[in-house]
Amino acid sequence: MDPLDISNEFLRTHSMFGGLTNKELEVVKPLLEKKSFAPKEKILIEGTPNNRVYFIVSGEVAILKHPMGKEELEYQIATLEEGDSFGEMELIDIQNCAATVECLSDVTTISLSNFHLYELSQIDLHLYTMLIMNLARDISRRLRSTNNLLAMVSK
């Protein structure tokens, strides 16, 4: 599937594209990059740079964390599938990857780079603002979920 052939309806299954018009989605589509990965392949590695947000088109990935940077300890903290995204944090805070993303099956993603996001800020400030607000909402939802889990563990 060429990213240009991805339907607007599919893009809207990803919260980052929520509230965008068809015209705005047509501006974003040429900036998307499609890539396929094999089972066990690591898309992102904790502690390394990342400049993309990824959207899962098909397949399933594990989110792995090494507590306190200890390579010998590895915990699967989440499983993501079609319709989910990852890599958002690095686009916002420009830090290294917070976790490792490993494929549990054949995975196809589309992604948007930080560079292309910046380009959007130069050509369509409203579109850029919508994308950033949607990213912030996703991160906020995940933070709330994590807070709830931590509150249950600490009881």
Image: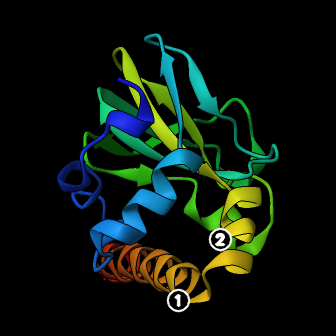
Is 59 in front, or is 28? 28
- SS at mark 2? helix
Q: Name the disc covering residue 63, or none.
A: none
> As drawn, is 124 to the left or to the right of 133?
right
> As drawn, is 65 to the left or to the right of 137?
right
Tell me, what colour scheme is on the image?
rainbow
Q: Amino acid at mark 2?
A: Leu
Residue displayed at 41% across by 70% down: 24
Q: Picture coordinates of residue 147 (x, y %)?
A: 39, 82
Q: Picture coordinates of residue 40 (x, y %)?
A: 49, 14
The earlier-in-sequence mark between 1 and 2 is: 2
Kindly identify which residue carries mark 2.
Answer: 120
Is 91 in front, or is 28? 28
- In the rendered image, the vertical position of residue 36 relative to residue 113, given as above or below: above
Q: Picture coordinates of residue 108 (x, y %)?
A: 40, 25
Residue displayed at 33% across by 16% down: 105
Residue displayed at 69% across by 62% down: 90
Q: Amino acid at mark 1?
A: His
For the C terminus, which image quadrant?
A: bottom left
Kindly identify which residue carries mark 1.
Answer: 126
